[in-house]
Image (spheres, rainbow, N blue to C red):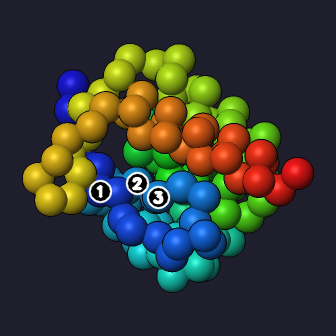
Amino acid sequence: MRAALFILAAVPLAALVQPAAAQDRALATTQIVSGDYATAEKALGAELRIYPNRPELLLNLAAVYAKTGRAAQARALYSQVLAQDDVLMDLPAERVAGSHAVARTGLSRLANVQFTAR
């Protein structure tokens, strides 16, 4: 199984994780990049009610949680992605990564931010 995913560059130091998005979820990605986290969270929540295990949705919502200071909730979503099968995802610049790699990157960034905040 292969899902389309785009990792977008985020503002340095402001971004804890890079948001991921399927092509049909581009609006939520745009909202994340523009900092409209509340609207993105609503859109992703609605999609997750229909597709509760889509890794690109879980990763995007984890990005929203991380960027809004909800590390525990972000960590839970990353763990949920890691509990599923690893899915190959297309990244920008014709790169490919697994959903597990993206989730592990998000988790490591959460750990780095918590460590530096102490």
Residue neighbourhood size for the residue with mark 1, other residues' Cα within 10 Å, grouped as few (<14), some (14–19), many (≥20): many
The residue indicated by pointer 2 is: 20
Q: Amino acid at mark 1?
A: Phe
Quick one: SS at disc 1?
A: strand
Q: Residue at x 34, y 57 (%)?
A: 7
Real-space CA distance between mark 3 and mark 2, rounded to the nearest whole angstrom: 7 Å
Of residues 81 and 39, the one nearer the viewer is 81
Q: Is residue 31 shown to the viewer in this render?
A: no
Image point (29%, 50%), residue name: 5
Determine the CA span between mark 2 and mark 1: 5 Å
Q: Which residue position holds label 1?
A: 6
Q: Return the residue at label 3.
A: 18
Q: Using the image as rendered, state which of residue 54 and residue 109 is in the foreground.
A: 109
Dot placed on the residue nearer the N-terminal end, 2 or 1: 1
Residue 79 left/right relative to 24:
right
Which residue appears at 42% of the width and 75% of the height? 30
Crowd band around label 3 with a 10 angstrom C-alpha radius: few (<14), some (14–19), many (20+): many
- Residue 69 occupies quadrant: bottom right
Mark 3 or mark 1, whichever is nearer to me: 3
Callout 3 touching callout 2 (CB < 8 Å): yes
Disc sitting over residue 115 in the figure: none
Residue kind at label 3, given as amino acid type? Gln
